[in-house]
Amino acid sequence: MASTRSYLQILKKTNPLRESTIQSAIKALQIPQGSRGLDVGCGIGLQIPLLAKAVGSSGKVVGLDQSAEFLVFAKNNIDKKIIGQISFKQGDIAKLLFEDNSFDWVWSCDCVGYPSGDLLPLLNEMRRIVKPGGKIAILGWTFQHLLPGYALLESRLNATGSVFIPHYKGIAPQRHFQRSLGWFQKAGLKKSTVKTFVGDICPPLNEETRTALILFFNMLWGERQSDIAKKDRDEFQRLCHPDSPDFILNIPDYYGFFVYSMFYGIV
């Protein structure tokens, strides 16, 4: 298991692969200029600059996370040009320490309800602090196809070796992230809907993208290799280890994609 510090570096190094896709989701929300918003479960603040850009120089963004170490990392990595727009708070996402109607919108990426859990209490708490007419949006990674030509292997890795397995095993289907639309409706949010965003990966792959993909391979399937059949584990190592002569990112026609889903509604 990676140390916390190395895990934070992994998050930072994988961000370039996802950033433009997440930026497209933020743009689709049409966040008003000059508004005040909350990033729930902001982690190391990777989306804070994107949200700050959306609200403009007259807007404000608050990042909330329960980890003091994550927040210190976030503060140390924020561009000084936007520091006046940003503040961070440590707190529990299940009990938001803000007054009613404090924000124009609330956002969460890969945190609230992700990849499974009790979403309704969290949505009710988020709804409490958003002004009438404001938006609540949660975004989560929902699918990937990163091993072109090896669809069956990738399916087996997802089924037996994926890092998500502990979060899904024994969990009722309606508690999975992809069932969030029903919980938005139960929370009384209006015009609740979902939108899909796809990130494409194709040559030429720069060093940033290669590094991010190598880390994703390990994050998705490398941590639980004891649960994978030996032949699939060997094939995973052959294709996904950068020192392998068959490393999949070296093929000239490499193509992969990943999917983010955004659920949102109006208070």
Image: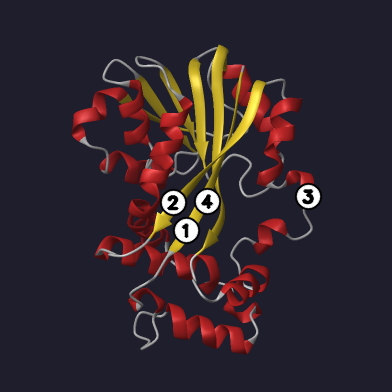
Circles 4 and 1: CB atoms closer than 8 Å = yes
Q: Secondary structure at mark 2?
A: strand
Q: Which residue is mark 4?
A: 259
Q: Amino acid at mark 1?
A: Phe
Choose top left, top right, bottom left or bottom right for residue 201. bottom left
* Closer to viewer: mark 3 or mark 4: 4
* In this rendering, position of residue 171 left or right of residue 255: right
Mark 4 neighbour class, 10 Å CA radius: few under 14, some 14 to 19, many 20 or more: some
Q: Nearer the viewer, residue 241 or 149?
A: 149
- Sequence order check, earlier mark of 1 and 2: 2
Give residue 132's position: percent from left, percent from top.
58, 10
Q: Amino acid at mark 3?
A: Pro
Mark 1 neighbour class, 10 Å CA radius: few under 14, some 14 to 19, many 20 or more: some
Give residue 216's position: percent from left, percent from top.
45, 64
Between the C-alphas of marks 1 and 2, the distance is 5 Å
* In this rendering, position of residue 258 left or right of residue 204: right
Q: Residue at x 78, y 44 (%)?
A: 174
Mark 2 neighbour class, 10 Å CA radius: few under 14, some 14 to 19, many 20 or more: some
Q: Which mark is residue 257?
A: 1
Circles 1 and 2: CB atoms closer than 8 Å = yes
Q: Which residue is mark 3?
A: 173
- Sequence order check, earlier mark of 3 and 1: 3
